[in-house]
Amino acid sequence: MFSKYRKLNEEDSIKYIKEKMDVFGKDERLISREIGDGNINYIFQINSQDSNFSVVIKQADKKLRSSGRDLDTDRIRIEAEALNIEGELSKGMVPKIYLYDREMRCIIMEDLSKYQIMRKALVERKIIKNFSENISDFLLNTMLPTTDLVNTPMEKKKMVKKFINPELCDISERLVFTDPYRDIEENTFQKMNKNFVEGKLYKDEKLHLEVAKLKIQFMTNAQALIHGDLHTGSIFVKDDKIKIIDSEFAFYGPMGYDVGNIVANLFFAEIRNLVLNEKSNQFDKWITETIKNTVDLFKIKFINYLENNTKEKIAITNKFFDWYLDEVLGYTAGAAGLEMIRRIVGEAKVEDIESIKDSELKGNAERIGIKIAKELIMNRNKIKTGKNYLDIADEMIMEELNDGKIR
Ligand code: ADP
Ligand code: MG
């Protein structure tokens, strides 16, 4: 029945799963719910009423869930292949894949609904134990083995080919690297920040130059297989465990892009907590330490991993590793800044900031975020440690303290 593509609905998804897999008995009573909250794909959660087992089906339709615009369905192949690689390299930090169905453009995978989306946990000010340890492991273990230093250069080039992802890269190139810097209708923010955004983002040519450099590197530096959309909405958490989902943006790009995305999204949780005037609580302490430790652990593990695993034979000295890491760190700071700006003014917002009800406080949050972001982009080649990030944030927060409603 499902040998040719058709778009699933809840009812069909039950017939589909029974046809494709034998994890549920023929007469088992199943319930399907479409639970997608993104704007791209459809997610069906299938629960058995007769056993505890459940699965999730992700289907990529050729039309976007939100706007109905066309989007290449090759993204579901990329997601399935990336999840397989990430799962193997990270030893299980992604959902188990039960089946990838090319015809139906579906991935049938482990149901993670016992986990919570990290962004929601952060909005609830939950402390996620060992997060910096775990995410730095994920980043290192999934990215470094795919680089030219660790994979054989020939195999690596074949992999680059597999992960050419034009349409999804185009989305990032537009939403992250272009639109937030132009005065266009799609950009939205608090009215009080109109002049601020114009001056700081639309008219700053020095900033545009640096954004253009970062954009070209994004487009041309096939450094490693990266996730490409690694924000806190793509991370499930439970106690001290994390699972990474939604790898459809994966391609060979600069490693710092993923690391910077993590840092930026941690900053959103910090800024939210700060403007809601709960600065001196445990959560603030944890989130700032987590920002710092994520960068510092990434650095230590990065060098360590390369010292033990590099296959490249020329110039393999610590000086070379330091040079290589330095470039990644610079891109990390730049990407963190880009992500913060695009989430504050651009089309795809984040709940951390969106859920601040008071418009003056939200305006404060926007300005703090944009100020930190610009520092990160403009000074990225000097930002080398976790402490550097915290110092910049402290300075920008101080600047804002006098002007706004925050205390
Ligand atoms: P999209 O690519 O459309 O953004 P995501 O992969 O981000 O889709 O998934 C959207 C939502 O569906 C997630 O935020 C999560 O709530 C839910 N979801 C996705 N995958 C799973 C899973 N394996 N288990 C449980 N829920 C999931
Ligand atoms: Mg997605």
Image (cartoon, rainbow, N blue to C red):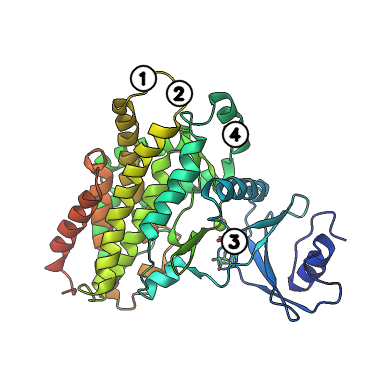
Q: Residue at x 44, y 47 (%)?
A: 139
Tell me the residue that label 4 is attached to.
Answer: 159
x, y percent for residue 8 = 75, 65
Q: Nearer the viewer, mark 4 or mark 3?
A: 4
**Whole-number angstrom distance, CA of label 1 to CA of label 2:** 8 Å
Q: Is residue 83 left or right of residue 268?
A: right
Q: Secondary structure at mark 3?
A: loop
Q: Nearer the viewer, mark 2 or mark 4?
A: 2
**Whole-number angstrom distance, CA of label 3 to CA of label 2:** 46 Å
Q: Secondary structure at mark 2?
A: loop
* Label annotation for residue 207: none
x, y percent for residue 326 = 30, 35
Tell me the residue that label 2 is attached to.
Answer: 312
The amino acid at mark 2 is: Glu
Q: Nearer the viewer, residue 285 or 2?
A: 285
Tell me the residue that label 1 is attached to.
Answer: 315
Can residue 199 be seen from the camera position used here?
Answer: no
Count residues near mark 2 (Cα–Cα under 10 Å), then give few for <14, some for 14-19, many for 20+: few
Quadrant where the image shows the N terminus: bottom right
Q: Residue at x 46, y 34 (%)?
A: 223
Quadrant hosting residue 13: bottom right
State yes or no: discs 4 and 1 in contact (Cβ < 8 Å): no
Q: Nearer the viewer, residue 277 or 345?
A: 277
First along the sequence among labels 2 and 4: 4
First along the sequence among labels 4 and 1: 4
State yes or no: discs 3 and 2 in contact (Cβ < 8 Å): no
Quadrant where the image shows the C terminus: bottom left
State yes or no: discs 1 and 2 in contact (Cβ < 8 Å): yes
Q: Residue at x 78, y 51 (%)?
A: 103
**Whole-number angstrom distance, CA of label 4 to CA of label 3:** 32 Å
Residue 165 vertical placement versus 406 (above, below)? above
Tell me the residue that label 3 is attached to.
Answer: 67
